[in-house]
Image (cartoon, helix red, strand yellow):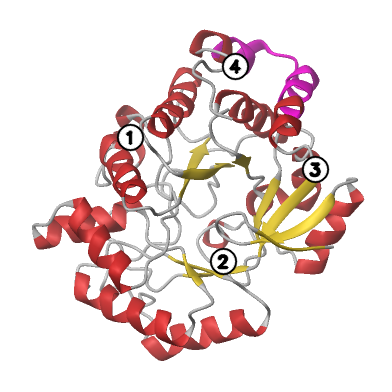
Amino acid sequence: MTPLQPIIHREQALELLLHGDLLALGREADAVRQRFHPENRVTFVVDRNVNYTNVCLSRCSFCAFYRDIDAKDAYLLDNKSIFDKIDELVERGGTQLLMQGGLHPGLQLSYFEELFREIKGRFPQVQNHSLSPAEICHLADRHGLSILQVLTRLKEAGLDSVPGGGAEILVDEVRQAISPKKIGWQRWGEVMLAAASLGMTTTATMMFGSRETPEQLIEHLFRVRSLQEQGGSFTAFIPWTYQPGNTELGGETATGVEYLKVLALSRMVLDNIPSIQASWVTQGAKLAQVALFFGANDLGGTMLEENVVAAAGCSFRMSQQEMIDLIQGAGFTAAQRSTGYQILREF
């Protein structure tokens, strides 16, 4: 299902964001979800986030996780610690590894090539869904390589797919305000299109509620849509709300109503991306359950481990059985999936 024209245009989307009725938006988004997923199934993946380092040159004002390299609590995990974490993931039936850290000044491309080869050799059943576009660009800049060259080498070493972290809002005025040292939106898109050209699947994200205007939020959605039209390989879109706790930026987080509105608009605008993921990590189980009636068809990962959002004081946790119960309690069939959305088993 890849229509030439979007269900709604920018002006309509902005009007709905500003003045649309929440429940009416939910009904429209739910109708789109049912067209994509008539089987009444809600999926999840059993995964683990391994944050291999918290050292980051980017120093984004909205991030409570990063540390300078000389900070007392700065760290870089050794390989044994990483392998032990993946071992635990495999023991629990996990299939996806999400490795992300920061822009560490001491790590070269060869570090990731060697690490990824070792991971693939030890854990061939695990999908290595790792490194944000910012991390990939950092490696390209450090070595004087193109983004495509870096991704080609990482893929050969065992990187399977690329997550969409670091998108925040894909408008450079916002990025300059909240993360001036991070890559601009066009380089983020370049990474995603390059990954797609290599046959790698990707995801797209949005962190909203920090400093963007409603117009900039809508622009983000349409830029993601355009990237998909240009040959992107986004399997899912994941919007979540900025978490201000312990951050330099501070401020307030978006309300549950605002989250549901944005989620519903995401499902309507991004009608060329098959799945919309609800963010239980930032919204909690109850609101994530409501999100299943506002366009979401996926609950993301069980996340055996999560450190970045937790650093901002947001620490919702959910076991696999709790996730299954949540899905079934909303009247859907629960299904464990792979990173690429193949169904592994239903419950």
The stretch in magenta equals 14-30
Q: CB under 8 Å between callouts 2 and 3?
A: no
Q: Which circle, 4 or 1, is nearer the viewer?
A: 4
Residue position for label 3: 39
Between the C-alphas of marks 4 and 1, the distance is 31 Å
Q: Secondary structure at mark 2?
A: loop
The relative height of residue 145 versus residue 124 in the rendered view (above or below) is above
Q: Secondary structure at mark 4?
A: loop
Q: Quadrant of residue 321?
A: bottom right
In the image, is 187 to the left or to the right of 273? left
Q: Earlier in the sequence, mark 2 or mark 3?
A: 3
Q: Earlier in the sequence, mark 2 or mark 1?
A: 1
Q: Which circle, 2 or 3, is nearer the viewer?
A: 3
The majority secondary structure of the magenta stretch comes to helix
Between the C-alphas of marks 3 and 4, the distance is 22 Å
> Which residue does the image show at 62% across and 35% down from the upper left?
254
Q: Amino acid at mark 1?
A: Ala
Q: Earlier in the sequence, mark 1 or mark 3?
A: 3
